[in-house]
Structure formats: C-alpha cells, structure tokens
Amino acid sequence: MKPLTNVLLSNILVRLLSFCVLVFLARFAYVVTVKGQSCDSIDFCFSSVFQDLMTEGVLSTNSSSLCIETLAAEEVIALRGIGVVKSIGISSKKLSSEGVRYGKSLNQPFKNLTFDFEFSSTSGLDQTLNPVQFALEVSRTLKPGGFFVVHTKSVNDEYSLRSLLELFDTFTLIKLREMDGLDSLPVREIILRKENVTLLKIKTANKCSVPSYKQELIRKAEPLIKQEPLKSWITLKRNIKNVKYLSTMVDISFKNRYVYIDVGARSYGSSIGSWFKKQYPKQEKPFEIYAVEADSAFYDEYKTKKGVKLLPYAAWIRNETLFFEISRDPSRKNEERGRGMGRIQAVQSSSNFMGDLNKIHGFDFAMWLKNTVVEKDYVVVKMDVEGTEFHLIPRLIESGAICLIDEIFLECHYNRWQKCCPGKRSPKYQKTYAQCLELFTSLRKHGVLVHQWW
C-alpha cells in the first residue's frame, strides 16, 4: 500500500506543479493575434510584430531603433533577437535591463535626427499627459524618411485617429491595422513615415473643412427640434436628456489642451458649477475654464473659484465700449438678493448712446478665440448672450474661428410664447424660432456639433 500511496502523491504533486506553471505562464502571457498567429509570450509577440515590419520595409537590421517607455525591455530584446542590434529603449522608471536607459518620453536624452525607427507600445503615447510634446520629441529625434510605429488602444474612431495624426504634422500615414489584445480590447498599430517638410493642409480662406467623420458625428447627434414648441421652457429642458455629447461618441485623448468657455456665464452656479463640472463627460481630462461675463454683480463670486478664469467683458464682434441693460426683479430689495435675476440684454454700440450709465467693454470674441486656442485643442463652448448670438455666430463663421470649436451649446433667443399670457409672444426679442433653427442648421453644416440649449 505504501508504494501505491507514494505514486498517488507523486502524481498529485506533478499535476499541481504543472497547474501552477500554467497559471504562471497565463498570468504573464501577452496574447496578441497578428495575421492569424497567436503569440504565447511577450518576446515572441513583439518579434512577430517587428518581423512583419521588416517584411514591409519599415524596419531593417541596419535601423538605429528606439523603443519609448518600455516596461521591461521586451521590445528591445525582441528587436535584437531578430538582428536589429542598434536598438535601445528609454523608460521613465529606472530599469536594470540591458539596452534600456533612464529617460523621459517628453525630453528624450538623444540628439536631433538620431534614429531610423521609433516604436511606442500601449505604455507610451497612450499614457502620456502631454501628447503634443511626445510627438515633438519623436519628430526631433527621428530622421527624415524614418518610421514611427505606435500601438494604441485609444484610437477607436475616425475622430481620435485624426486627432493623433494632427500631432504628427510632418508625418504621412502609411498603414493602420488592428490586433487583438489579451484583455479583448483591440490594439491598433499605426505606421507613420517622417517627411522632409511639414505637410501643408489645403484650407480655403477661413472656411472649415467638413470631413466625412464630422458629418457622421452630426448625423448621430440628437435631431434639432424643427417645430416651434408651444411651451419652450419645458420642451428644451427635456431635450437636454437627449443630448449626445461629443465626448461620449469619440475618444478625446490625443488633444493638446481641453478648454471650456462659458459665454454669458452669469454666476458660477448657473452652468459651470451646476452643469459642466457635474454633468459634462470629460473622460478624466483636466479642462481649463473661462467665464465670459459682463455683469459686475457676479465678479466677487469668481474670486473664490479656483480653476476658473473670469473675462469681465461682453463677447462682441469687435473691441469697443458698449452699453447694456440689466433687468432686475423689482421685488428684490437689494442687488445681492437679486443676483441671477438680471440678464444682459442685446448689446449695442455706444456710439448711439449718449448716457454714461451701464457702460461695459466689449471684445472681439472671434479674434480672442483664435489667439487663445488652436486646432489641436479640444474646445467646448456654451453661449447664452441674450440675442447677440445673431451677431456672434456669423462673425465666428466669417473669421474661421468656428473651426476651432468642437462642440457648442447655444441658447437662441426669440419671441417665445409667454408663460403668463396664452397666445401672446414676448416682445423682448424680435427674432423668430425659424431664424433660430436656421442658425443651428448653419452651424451643423459648418461641421460644428451644436446643441439647442435652454
């Protein structure tokens, strides 16, 4: 019986050991399918990827190669294993692995035009907090005609692909293909070639290009309310539940900055604190916030709000002194209690106004926008300017500044039906709902994702 017991114990131990080995291998396996082949280890996986690149002429044994933000030198080992001996990696974490030196992707420790080939896995470009600087460093150290290959999980749509390509404005897209990652999330391989000069974008005057992917995003957006609502204050508030935010449809990772501009911000709690901070889907990105507000009654509040830059002016079509009228609730006994009740009325040029009361500074909002943000930024605008949208929007379109806005939430002011008096319209505004609808339609035709606001 003893020998039989020993045999059984031995079999159990062997099976247990085998199981532990399998678990260990599964834990560290990086399974990626490339052209129908499965990689069973990290080294083999990268070897397969690099061998394919060799076959396509992207990489050769003579290539001076850099692997950016390597986690454990796997890429360098794989490159050297297939004969690319002039390979080195950099990592912001100090590694003891041969062939890897300490260095930051945003400040590569190499001279200009050093490499023929650079590679970034999903631990590189995907993880950086400054994709623009990352791209600049790749462009600086890569030779003209050299290749940059990036693996990314963040390119899931045409918008994010275009955002990535805009970072590399001296590169040409050679190939894009998809691989299956261990966590079932697709990994996309993007192959770029550096050119000798910056690629010129064809742009007609101040007109925005409206590529097909922008048109598709607008088609996916909530439809505009074409029929004038009888109770607009109810219909438009309900409509906000149907809004399809741009950041819920696309990945916004490959942007330079993230900017929110509240034009006609009123108090902090009016929309910045109550809506944008709490409800707008930001994909965990740090947004710079600008509050454009001409009513001095709100200025003290913004002094205590960190992270919000107050522009104490009225958004207008040029720089000039303006006047405005504020309607306050007469039941309020003082200015402080009445805060939030008054609204800036349609702004007019002071040249037709002889008095000195209620004068404010207006600034050319379109020019300010062009001087503040660039196309590589992600820009969201909310505009509630009591009728001056019929001046500001055409100015934004004519100047080309509208091309810089990714998404806009616009309240259009028209002669609505009054709550108090059935069958009577408000005399406050002269524009009609049809004119508002035309304004929204025009913006969408220019490739801007605009939403009807209340």
Image (cartoon, grey):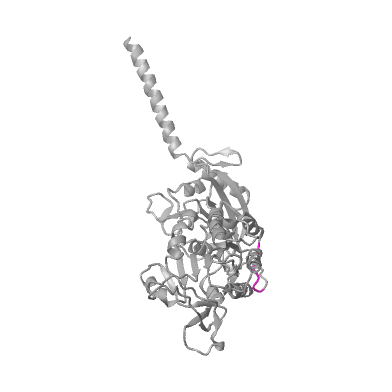
Q: Indicate yes or no whether the magenta region holds residue 209.
A: yes
On the image, the x and y values in percent for residue 240 come to 54, 57
**Vertical comparison of 62 with 370: above or below:** above
**How many numbered marks are there?**
0
The kind of secondary structure the magenta stretch mainly shows is loop
Q: Position of residue 20 (x, y in %)?
A: 40, 30
Query: Magenta part of the protein: which range?
Result: 205-210
Quarter of the image with the C terminus in it: bottom right
Q: In the displayed structure, would residue 295 be above or below residue 88? A: below
Q: Nearer the viewer, residue 155 or 228?
A: 228
Residue 342 appears in view: yes
Considering every residue shown, the one lying at the far bottom of the view is 354
x and y, in percent, of residue 309 in the image:
43, 71
Quarter location, residue 48: top right
**Residue drawn at (63%, 62%) of the image:** 228
Q: Is residue 330 magenta?
A: no
Nearest the eye: 72 or 135: 135
Q: Quadrant of residue 395?
A: bottom right
- Residue that lies at the very extreme toward the left in this rendered image: 2
Residue 261 in percent (x, y) is at 49, 68
Res 62 seen here: no
* Left or right: where 111 falls relative to 208: left
Quarter in which the N terminus is drawn:
top left
Quarter of the image holding residue 16? top left
In the rendered view, tell whether residue 314 sits above or below residue 201.
below
The structure residue drawn at horizontal position 46% and vertical position 51%, both measured from the top left corner, is 123
